[in-house]
Amino acid sequence: MHGHQFIHRMFLAGSMILFAVLFTSPVQAADKAHTPPTTPSANASIPSIAAGAIEDSLQACLSRIPKDATAGQRMLAEQSCRRDDGYRKPFQATGGR
């Protein structure tokens, strides 16, 4: 009787594994759509300073936020600019690098 239960459980487990393998389709990454290069923004006349550099300013960082950004993107970018500006202030105060 004990052997019969073992065989029954093994058959059930094997059936479940086979069912899972047969009915799950492999996931393939979709090809990324080719996006055309963007044109330079209206702020192209601003000298290019690396974002986050000590020479960067809050106003320069805020000016790099795209005008067509969503409200959430804009909020996150503004918070990041203010955070980075707070990190830069001690370095700017000492004039050091």
Image (spheres, grey):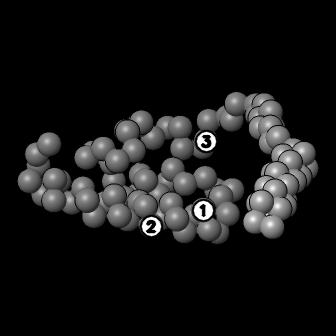
Say which mark, if any, is on residue 73. Answer: 1
Q: Position of residue 15 (x, y in %)?
A: 87, 53
Q: Is residue 84 above or below residue 45?
A: below
Give residue 68's quadrant in the image: bottom right
Kindly state the secondary structure of the residue where label 3 is placed: loop
Amino acid found under the numbered disc labelled 2: Gln
Q: Quadrant of the C terminus?
A: top left
Residue behind mark 2: 79
Residue behind mark 3: 41
Q: Earlier in the sequence, mark 1 or mark 2?
A: 1
**Can residue 2 be seen from the camera position used here?**
yes
Q: What's the distance in space between the residues labelled 1 and 3, CA to CA? A: 17 Å
Q: Residue at x 65, y 58 (%)?
A: 69
How many marks can you see?
A: 3
Amino acid found under the numbered disc labelled 3: Ser
Q: Earlier in the sequence, mark 3 or mark 2?
A: 3
- From the viewer's side, name the closer residue of 93 and 1: 1
- From the viewer's side, name the closer residue of 52 and 8: 8
Amino acid found under the numbered disc labelled 1: Gln
Q: Earlier in the sequence, mark 1 or mark 3?
A: 3
Kindly state the secondary structure of the residue where label 1 is placed: helix
Rate crowding at label 3 as few (under 14), some (14 to 19) or many (20 or more) other CA atoms within 10 Å: few
